[in-house]
Image (cartoon, rainbow, N blue to C red):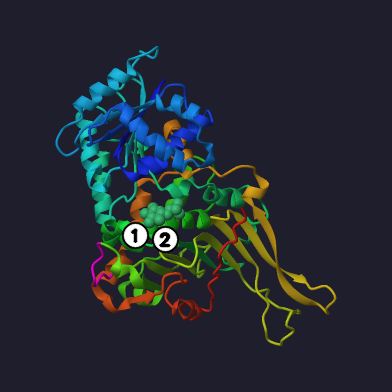
């Protein structure tokens, strides 16, 4: 059976920067089925040839050194373009066009599987789904055995209420098993490796709990500023842009119980349990348990309100109310315009119950650092374990040393782009790495109380930070009041 991928929002950035390069890579690696068609849908009138030429340039730019003209020429024959206006017309014309493509060549059964990729502005998601339904393009019965799946880009709603409304609208047309809500962090190899690290090894899981772990820190810092994305960012802010999706998704992998099988619902059941165990913050707790920051030049960015209260940085202290994690603080933080780009998970272990040894300085009362596990999601993908070692030629003095695992040293070649894995999984019907409706809603239930309290009650809570720093100055004192320290770490990149 052949596969048709329809990309709504074909002229958008995501299509040229991520989706087409990912599909090109899958083609180059022989991961695509024989007959795949990629149909771009957008307003701008263009011929297939014109769109292919545009994409040739961008794919070359975004595919690193792996682009060859020969491969592209072969791959680009799969690419088609259909111009249409989501706001003005239905999809009958599109359906006729798709059928005409699907009925050509040797593959005349017209049983093509379809994957609709919603990469437009989120305001169109519900109406695209409705129009697909109205044109009979969503039902797998009418499609005579072909599958009909839909990938929905983030953001999925802007709060719990809008996410529920969107879920309801999409469910009018598609069954949950047809829906793939994408979060590209779940396609990152290093994020998936958290599950392998925990559940394919026996030595870490026994200590992966409140008895041994003091706190967990998940950081996603970016050097980039908001730049030309102000129109979107002003409304979103850091909590909606990075926490509700990416950081909470990583958190579920770190905290979840082992599922019995690596299957979509088994995995997602466990993730939902984690999200539901996170204690929702009461308004009076938000001031104490969060930091809300904005980099100083943010208000000078084009399109940003001069009095903007939008957070470009946040740190949040969460608690999970379950047996494994009771009383272990989980710190999530993320910021734009930070000193370096790093996404990392720190598992900070407790101090040994009794210490006989001294640190290298030999100072009395100077505690030696407790064990720490650092999982570097990007850009220096790897894992380090920090542990104490006896300093040679001293009397039992200790120094912190590391075990180091690095993906690029242990495995050859570049790590694949997240969208490769996710597009392939969606084509193959594996939803393990996509968010389910209840999962998205549970994530909003954690974020909404914070965002709402910030907006309605805590105007004075916003603090400013210098671009190129680690966030507001008081962030260090803030975490110290809880008895912890940030592990601020800029990865060393070896070429
Ligand atoms: C996106 C956010 O979802 O993720 C961006 O909208 C952010 O603001 C990006 O820059 C980060 O993704 P990555 O893969 O570069 O870490």
Q: Which residues are magenta?
A: 303-309
The answer to whether marks 2 and 1 mark residues whose Cβ atoms lie closer than 8 Å is yes
Residue ID at (24%, 37%): 129
Closer to the camera in the image, 316 or 468? 468
**Which quadrant of the view contains residue 395?**
bottom right
Instruction: Classify the position of ligand 1 by quadrant: top left, top right, bottom left or bottom right.
Output: bottom left
Residue at x-position 31% and y-position 27%: 48
Q: How many marks?
A: 2
Image coords of residue 126 (percent x, y): 23, 42
Q: Which residue is drawn at the image coordinates 35% and 13% (left, top)?
A: 108
Q: In x, y percent, where is residue 427?
A: 42, 32
Mark 2 crowdedness (10 Å alpha carbons): few <14, some 14-19, many ≥20: some
Residue 284: where, in percent of width, then height?
32, 76
Q: Please tell me whether residue 435 is drawn above or below residue 111 in the rendered image.
A: below
Q: Residue furthest bottom?
A: 364
Location of mark 1 (residue): 227
User: Which SS class for mark 2?
Assistant: loop
Q: Which residue is mark 2?
A: 224
């Amino acid at each position: 059976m052949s596969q048709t991928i329809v990309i709504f929002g074909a002229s958008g950035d995501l299509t040229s920067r991520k989706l087409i390069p990912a599909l090109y890579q899958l083609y180059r690696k022989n991961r695509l089925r024989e007959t795949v068609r990629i149909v771009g849908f957008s307003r701008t009138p263009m011929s297939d040839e014109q769109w292919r030429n545009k994409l040739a340039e961008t794919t070359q730019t975004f595919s690193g050194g792996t682009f060859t003209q020969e491969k592209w020429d072969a791959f680009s024959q799969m690419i088609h373009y259909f111009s249409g206006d989501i706001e003005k017309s239905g999809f009958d014309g599109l359906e006729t066009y798709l059928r005409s493509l699907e009925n050509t060549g040797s593959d005349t059964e017209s049983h093509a599987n379809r994957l609709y990729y919603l990469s437009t502005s989120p305001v169109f998601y519900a109406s695209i789904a409705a129009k697909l339904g109205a044109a009979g393009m969503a039902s797998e019965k009418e499609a005579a055995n072909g599958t009909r799946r839909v990938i929905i880009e983030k953001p999925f709603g802007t709060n719990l209420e809008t996410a529920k409304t969107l879920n309801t609208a999409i469910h009018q047309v598609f069954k949950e098993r047809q829906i793939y809500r994408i979060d590209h962090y779940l396609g990152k190899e290093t994020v998936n490796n958290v599950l392998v690290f925990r559940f394919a090894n026996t030595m870490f899981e026994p200590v992966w709990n409140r008895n041994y772990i003091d706190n967990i820190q998940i950081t996603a810092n970016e050097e980039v500023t908001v730049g030309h994305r102000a129109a979107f960012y002003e409304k979103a802010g850091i909590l909606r842009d990075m926490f509700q999706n990416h950081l909470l998704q990583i958190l579920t992998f770190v905290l979840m119980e082992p599922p019995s099988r690596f299957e979509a619902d088994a995995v997602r059941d466990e993730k939902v349990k984690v999200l539901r165990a996170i204690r929702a913050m009461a308004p009076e707790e938000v001031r104490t348990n969060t930091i809300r920051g904005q980099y100083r030049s943010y208000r000078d960015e084009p399109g940003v309100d001069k009095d903007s209260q939008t957070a470009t940085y946040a740190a949040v202290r969460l608690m999970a109310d379950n047996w494994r994690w009771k009383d272990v603080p989980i710190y999530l933080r993320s910021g734009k315009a930070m000193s370096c780009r790093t996404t990392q998970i720190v598992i900070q272990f407790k101090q040994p119950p009794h210490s006989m040894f001294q640190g290298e300085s030999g100072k009395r009362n100077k505690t030696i650092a407790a064990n720490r596990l650092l999982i570097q999601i990007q850009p220096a993908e790897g894992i380090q374990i920090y542990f104490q070692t006896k300093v040679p030629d001293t009397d039992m003095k200790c120094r912190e040393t590391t075990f180091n695992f690095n993906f690029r040293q242990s495995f050859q070649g570049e790590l694949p782009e997240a969208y490769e894995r996710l597009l392939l999984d969606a084509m193959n019907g594996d939803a393990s790495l996509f968010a389910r409706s209840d999962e998205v809603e549970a994530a909003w239930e954690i974020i909404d109380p914070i965002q709402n309290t910030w907006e309605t009650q805590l105007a004075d809570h916003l603090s400013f930070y210098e671009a190129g720093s680690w966030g507001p100055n008081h962030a260090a004192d803030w975490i110290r009041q809880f008895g912890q320290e940030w592990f601020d770490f800029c990865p060393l990149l070896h070429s």
